[in-house]
Image (spheres, rainbow, N blue to C red):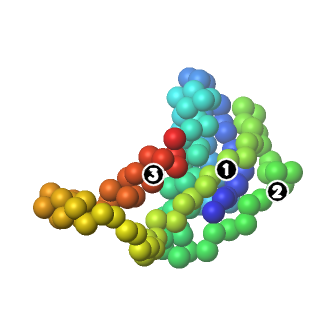
Amino acid sequence: MEYVYPAVFYANDNGSYTITYPDLPGCVSEGKSLVNALAMAYSALAEWIKYHTDKQIPLPDASPLYSITVGANEFVNLTRVEIKSGRSVKRTVSIPEWQAEKADQAGLSLSRILQDALTDRLVR
């Protein structure tokens, strides 16, 4: 599922940026540079949303950009994250018998191997 929230970036005197989300209490981060701050904003938002969805806490609506007031040395930027469900689903797969036997002998988890292979194939 995709989420987009406005983040307020405050430029500190030392060149770093403090990031807050007006709609998300406690969702705060900091970056050493603007590039780092953008990455940290993404990470903070993703973790905040994951925590609240795992705890089944309703997420607030995002404020429209025009409603956010910023002060000196501040700007608003939209941050978009995609949260993928970690819920497992059962699928039936077939493999040759000799592979199943070898995997059992080696103590391998076929589910883990399949997940790793699919992640490798789909994320590249």
Q: Which residue is mark 2?
A: 64
Query: At numbered mark 1, what does the secondary structure look like: helix, strand or loop?
Result: strand
For the residues carrying marks 2 and 3, which lies nearer the camera in this image? Answer: 3
Q: Quadrant of the N terminus?
A: bottom right
Nearer to me, 64 or 26: 64
Quarter assignment of residue 17? top right
Label 1 Cα neighbours within 10 Å, binned few <14 / some 14-19 / many ≥20: some
Residue 2 to residue 42: above or below: below
Q: Which residue is mark 3?
A: 119
Residue 50 to residue 54: above or below: above
Identity of the amino acid at label 2?
Answer: Pro
Q: Position of residue 121 (x, y in %)?
A: 48, 47
Q: Which residue is mark 1?
A: 80
Q: Position of residue 81 (x, y in %)?
A: 62, 52
Which tag, 2 or 3, sits closer to the chain's start? 2
Whether residue 19 is visible to the viewer of this picture, yes or no, is yes
User: In the image, 113: left or right of 18?
Assistant: left
Nearer to me, 8 or 123: 123
Task: Tell me the distance, in whole angstroms, between the alpha carbons under discs 3 and 1.
Answer: 21 Å
